[in-house]
Image (cartoon, helix red, strand yellow):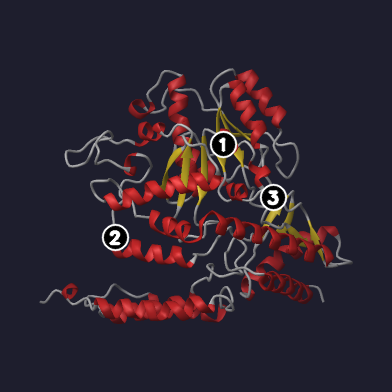
């Protein structure tokens, strides 16, 4: 029996992908976010594992046919529900190069090229956000992994304060780690604490209202009464309305009481790029650790995030692994980022980051952020002008939180109406914006972070919302 992998038809399959990519990507500007009528095509993916494969060309053609028809077009300009950017042209090309070269970015010994690109990319990201020169970090898969990486370093710091080497002995026998935050704390931070063994419900929430605004005085009282090492989580960019904790005030508390300040800046850290919004992240340069997503406002492909630490040497202590004879040790010149984060085998996710920053620079990203801020204000203005819509929060950055409130509909019916509106929007497919709960009220919270989004897309979004609302309230 001949080996089918020896007949890969590589030039043909790559041509098939390239030929499909251009029309698909060019159509993102006008096509709906998803087409409900194509759902039946997904059945063409299933079936038993074939004994004799259909060949690379047929398999790739089938995947392209189904994928380009049924994929959620979250890379397009009208996907607003989750905070998802698209992929800039340079980032997409960089990602294709990463797949082509297929580097293991674990060690300099496995790929000097990938290690150097990651080093430069991290340096450029630090400069992009205006962080002090001593900050360092590692690229990870997501904001969840960035929170995990940061809070792992905080866990080792906390263990040191109790005279315990967590890397060697774990957290058994230690008291519970005090983690203090306002009500904006994101589930990804809780998930990180869960994975680290502290428990997802270990966060002590101090909020001064139903929305979740942080009660700084209450956190200070807790720190004063505790008297030991603690972790404060500050939130730069709350996901329902884009609000910010006062990071500078939390930094003051951390310094006053010797606490570790972690800032979850998954998308909000990009406020630092514009003088118009930089005040929202004032004090972030004093944080001990910062988590961020790159596949949000940086507009690079999934999966991409990064963590920065004020003392980057802590990453090696937290993520260095027991040696094997064939692996470089933590102090070996052939070592690398596998020792600085949770993943050992690592994709070269630095390539799309390097490519997009090299292509568009600081000025390009500042312009994009400011355009999105303007679009959010345009959306807020359209909501304020509409007699059947109600804005629920200020718009400091790129998220507009609002709900339907048609005249004559009683308050008791509004949550149900808005839930049905969110379901109708997703089922309709022209735009994508589901619901959340903000201050106890069901609402929409479109987030604008895609480089393709324009005024036309914002206007269409509002028009679609009002059209579907009219159908729900005849």
Q: Do the residues under discs 3 and 1 have CB atoms within 8 angstroms?
A: no
Mark number displayed over residue 276: 3
Q: Is residue 420 visible?
A: yes
Q: Quadrant of residue 215?
A: top right
Q: Quadrant of residue 218?
A: top right
Relative image position of residue 428 (x, y in whole percent): 64, 75
Relative image position of residue 351 (x, y in whole percent): 38, 57
- The quarter of the picture where the C terminus appears is bottom right
**Which is nearer the N-term, disc 2 or disc 1?**
2
Asked which secondary structure carries label 1, the reply is helix
**Which is nearer the N-term, disc 3 or disc 2?**
2
Q: Nearer the viewer, residue 218 or 247?
A: 247
- Residue at which label 1 appears: 285
- Apparent side of residue 466 relative to residue 398 in the rendered image (left or right): right
- Apparent side of residue 413 relative to residue 248 in the rendered image (left or right): right
- The residue shown at (47%, 43%) is 307
How much space separates mark 2 and mark 1, taking CA atoms? Answer: 35 Å
Q: Nearer the viewer, residue 136 or 470?
A: 136
How many discs appear? 3
- The quarter of the picture where the N terminus appears is bottom left
Asked which secondary structure carries label 3, the reply is loop
How much space separates mark 3 and mark 2, taking CA atoms? Answer: 40 Å
- The residue shown at (44%, 33%) is 153
Measured along the vertical axis of the image, is residue 16 above or below residue 319? below
- The residue shown at (54%, 54%) is 362
Mark 2, other Cα within 10 Å: few <14 / some 14–19 / many ≥20:
few
- Residue at which label 2 appears: 102
**Which is nearer the N-term, disc 3 or disc 1?**
3
Q: Is residue 195 visible?
A: no
How much space separates mark 3 and mark 1, taking CA atoms? Answer: 18 Å
- The residue shown at (19%, 72%) is 5
Asked which secondary structure carries label 2, the reply is loop
């Amino acid at each position: 029996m001949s080996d089918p992998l020896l007949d890969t038809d590589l030039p043909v399959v790559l041509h098939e992908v390239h030929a499909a990519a251009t029309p698909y990507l060019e159509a993102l500007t006008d096509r709906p976010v998803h087409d409900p009528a194509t759902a039946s095509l997904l059945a063409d993916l299933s079936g038993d594992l074939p004994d004799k494969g259909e060949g690379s060309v047929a398999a790739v053609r089938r995947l392209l046919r189904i994928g380009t028809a049924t994929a959620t077009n979250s890379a397009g300009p009208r996907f607003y529900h989750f905070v998802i950017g698209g992929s800039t042209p340079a980032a997409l090309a960089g990602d294709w190069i990463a797949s082509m070269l297929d580097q293991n970015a674990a060690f300099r010994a496995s790929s000097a090229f990938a290690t150097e690109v990651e080093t430069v990319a991290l340096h450029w990201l630090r400069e992009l956000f205006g962080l002090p020169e001593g900050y360092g970090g590692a690229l990870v898969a997501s904001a969840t992994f960035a929170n995990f990486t940061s809070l792992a370093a905080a866990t080792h710091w906390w263990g040191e304060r109790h005279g315990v080497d967590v890397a060697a002995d774990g957290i058994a026998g230690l008291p519970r780690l005090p983690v203090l935050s306002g009500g904006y704390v994101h589930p990804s931070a809780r998930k990180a604490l869960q994975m680290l063994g502290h428990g997802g419900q270990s966060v002590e929430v101090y909020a001064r209202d139903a929305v979740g605004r942080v009660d700084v005085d209450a956190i200070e009282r807790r720190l004063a009464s505790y008297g030991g090492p603690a972790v404060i989580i500050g939130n730069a960019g709350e996901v329902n309305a884009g609000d910010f904790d006062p990071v500078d005030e939390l930094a003051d508390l951390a310094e006053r009481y010797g606490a570790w300040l972690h800032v979850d800046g998954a998308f909000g850290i990009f406020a630092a790029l514009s003088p118009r919004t930089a005040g929202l992240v004032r004090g972030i340069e004093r944080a001990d650790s910062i988590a961020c997503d790159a596949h949000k406002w940086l507009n690079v492909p999934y999966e991409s995030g990064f963590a920065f630490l004020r003392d980057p040497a802590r990453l090696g202590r937290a993520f260095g692994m027991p040696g094997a004879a064939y692996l470089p040790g933590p102090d070996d010149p052939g070592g690398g980022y596998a020792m600085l984060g949770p993943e050992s085998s690592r994709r070269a996710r630095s390539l799309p980051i390097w490519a997009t920053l090299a292509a568009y620079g600081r000025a390009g990203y500042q312009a994009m952020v400011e355009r999105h801020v303007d679009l959010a204000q345009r959306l807020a203005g359209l909501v304020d002008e509409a007699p059947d819509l109600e804005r629920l929060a200020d718009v400091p950055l790129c998220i507009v939180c609002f709900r339907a409130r048609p005249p004559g509909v009683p308050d008791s019916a509004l949550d149900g109406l808005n839930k049905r509106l969110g379901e109708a929007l997703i089922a309709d497919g022209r735009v994508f914006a589901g619901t959340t709960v903000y201050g106890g009220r069901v609402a929409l919270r479109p987030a604008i972070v895609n480089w393709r989004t324009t005024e036309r897309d914002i206007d269409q979004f509002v028009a679609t919302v009002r059209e579907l609302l009219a159908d729900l309230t005849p």
